[in-house]
């Protein structure tokens, strides 16, 4: 028997892989009823942050207890954008190298790095959209403007990626290189700046709350 604990409620399920979806639905309903989200699960003392359903299915026979650890939507959103900023900033050192590579005609390595960057940017775009929806659904609307600024700046960056693809499709790698050096770097920096401003705003709010 598996004991589910969430928001002070306790439910029990058989150790049956067919019950995993029902377990997760129960956890989500209990947590979301308080306008919170699941930060992670503690499964028999093991912290599980991702792929909850798969983990439960893989260990279904021996699991005894699953406890849902909730978090506020704003807290999760802030954690998301901090990770996004860290990831975007890691691209900055290679921008000049990639831009020069494109101006020289695009090597196989340069093309692969560009594809990796594109794929990451697409993932970030999806992640940001989910994050912004979470912020809009949160109880605290004081963050809306901050997150809007992040979204607007990232959209400028995302639009440049399409311009680069168009340049490459029209066999103009020099233009693509110039866009990477002059536009992508700029909008990456501005997006990260907006994210850091939002994180600073959150830190100031926490300090003010703790001081009351």
Image (cartoon, rainbow, N blue to C red):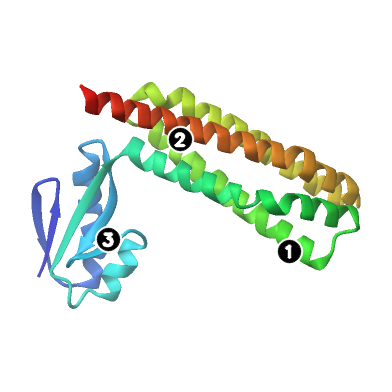
Q: Secondary structure at mark 2?
A: helix
Task: Bin the neighbour count of mark 1 within 10 Å (Cα to Cα): few under 14, some 14-19, many 20 and up.
Answer: few
Q: Secondary structure at mark 1?
A: helix
Disc 2 to disc 1, how far (Cα)? 30 Å
Judge from the rendering whether residue 185 lies leftward or rightward of residue 43; answer left or right. Answer: right
Q: Nearer the viewer, residue 103 or 145?
A: 103
Q: Which residue is mark 1?
A: 112
Task: Bin the neighbour count of mark 2 within 10 Å (Cα to Cα): few under 14, some 14-19, many 20 and up.
Answer: many
Say which of marks 3 and 2 sits in front: 2
Disc 3 to disc 2, how far (Cα)? 26 Å
Please tell me which of labels 3 and 2 falls first in the chain. Answer: 3
Could you tell me if the residues under marks 2 and 1 are in contact, i.e. CB atoms within 8 Å?
A: no
Disc 1 to disc 3, how far (Cα)? 38 Å
Name the residue located 41 percent from the left edge and 27 percent from the top edge: 201
Residue 202, by quadrant, is top left
The answer to whether residue 126 shows anywhere in this view is: no
Q: Which residue is mark 3?
A: 21
Judge from the rendering whether residue 100 lies leftward or rightward of residue 84; answer left or right. Answer: right
Q: Position of residue 41 (x, y in %)?
A: 24, 58
Name the residue located 17 percent from the left edge and 72 percent from the top edge: 63
Which numbered marker is on residue 132?
A: 2
Which numbered marker is on residue 129?
A: none
Judge from the rendering whether residue 89 lies leftward or rightward of residue 140; answer left or right. Answer: right
Name the residue located 39 percent from the left edge and 37 percent from the top edge: 134
Name the residue located 68 percent from the left edge and 52 percent from the top edge: 93
Say which of marks 2 and 1 sits in front: 1
194 w.r.t. 128: above or below: above
């Amino acid at each position: 028997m598996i004991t589910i604990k969430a928001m002070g409620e306790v439910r029990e399920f058989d150790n049956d892989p067919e019950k995993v979806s029902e377990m997760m639905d129960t956890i989500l309903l209990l947590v979301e009823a308080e306008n919170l989200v699941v930060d992670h699960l503690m499964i028999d003392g093991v912290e599980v942050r991702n792929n909850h359903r798969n983990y439960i299915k893989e260990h279904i026979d021996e699991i005894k207890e699953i406890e849902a650890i909730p978090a506020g939507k704003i807290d999760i959103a802030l954690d998301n954008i901090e990770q996004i900023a860290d990831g975007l900033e890691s691209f900055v050192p290679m921008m000049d190298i990639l831009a020069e590579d494109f101006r020289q005609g695009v090597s196989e390595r340069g093309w692969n790095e560009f594809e990796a960057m594109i794929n990451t940017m697409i993932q970030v775009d999806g992640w940001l959209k989910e994050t912004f929806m979470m912020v809009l659904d949160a109880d605290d609307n004081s963050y809306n403007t901050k997150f809007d600024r992040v979204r607007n700046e990232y959209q400028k960056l995302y639009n440049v990626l399409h311009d680069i693809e168009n340049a490459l499709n029209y066999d103009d790698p020099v233009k693509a290189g110039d866009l990477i050096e002059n536009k992508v770097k700029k909008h990456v920096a501005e997006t990260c700046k907006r994210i850091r401003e939002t994180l600073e705003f959150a830190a100031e709010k926490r300090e003010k709350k703790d001081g009351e």
